[in-house]
């Protein structure tokens, strides 16, 4: 399906808020990107870990502001749901981040984040 520029911008607004929250060490900014019921999952020492997104939001509040950037690698949309993959960097740390988003009214909200820390 062809994604309109408007829809792409709406989806990337959520990703931008997430990255900006990290850049400014602001959970308040990052929270705007996520559904309150969103989750974050990753693999730690071979084991699946999953937490409510509030853990990430609280974590951003404990950070120091840092350089942050991302490169979009995948954007797949089916009407009102989307999957996004980015390569991100927060300070010296690099990640492969994948997000599932759902359109909520006019806004796109991240409902899940999974990530891999790049070595």
Image (spheres, rainbow, N blue to C red):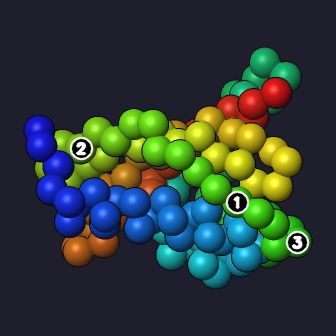
The residue indicated by pointer 1 is 68
As drawn, the residue found furthest toward the left would be 1
Horizontal and vertical percent for residue 33?
49, 68
Q: Is residue 14 visible?
A: yes
Crowding near pointer 2: few (<14 within 10 Å), some, many (20+)? Answer: some
Quarter occupied by the N terminus: top left
| Spatial separation of the CA atoms under disc 2 and disc 3 | 34 Å
- The residue located at (85%, 48%) in the rendering is 92
Horizontal and vertical percent for residue 58?
76, 69
The residue indicated by pointer 3 is 64
Horizontal and vertical percent for residue 89?
71, 49
Q: Which badge, 2 or 1, comes first in the chain's sequence?
A: 1
- Residue mark closest to the camera, 2 vs 1: 1
Q: Which residue is nearer to you in this view: 1 or 62?
A: 1
The residue indicated by pointer 2 is 77
- The residue located at (41%, 67%) in the rendering is 13
Picture layout, residue 83 above or below residue 20: above
Image side of residue 79 versus residue 82, left or right? left
For mark 1, give the secondary structure: strand
Horizontal and vertical percent for residue 107?
30, 72
């Amino acid at each position: 399906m062809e994604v309109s520029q408007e829809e792409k911008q709406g989806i990337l607004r959520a990703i931008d808020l997430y990255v900006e929250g990290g850049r400014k060490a602001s959970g308040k900014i990052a929270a705007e990107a996520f559904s309150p019921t969103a989750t974050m999952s990753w693999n730690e020492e071979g084991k699946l870990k999953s937490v409510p997104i509030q853990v990430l939001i609280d974590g951003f509040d404990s950070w120091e502001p840092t350089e942050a950037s991302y490169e979009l690698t995948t954007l797949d949309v089916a009407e009102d749901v989307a999957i996004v993959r980015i390569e991100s960097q927060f300070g010296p740390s690099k990640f492969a981040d994948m997000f599932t988003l759902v359109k909520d009214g006019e806004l796109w909200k991240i409902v899940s984040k999974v990530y891999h820390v790049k070595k």
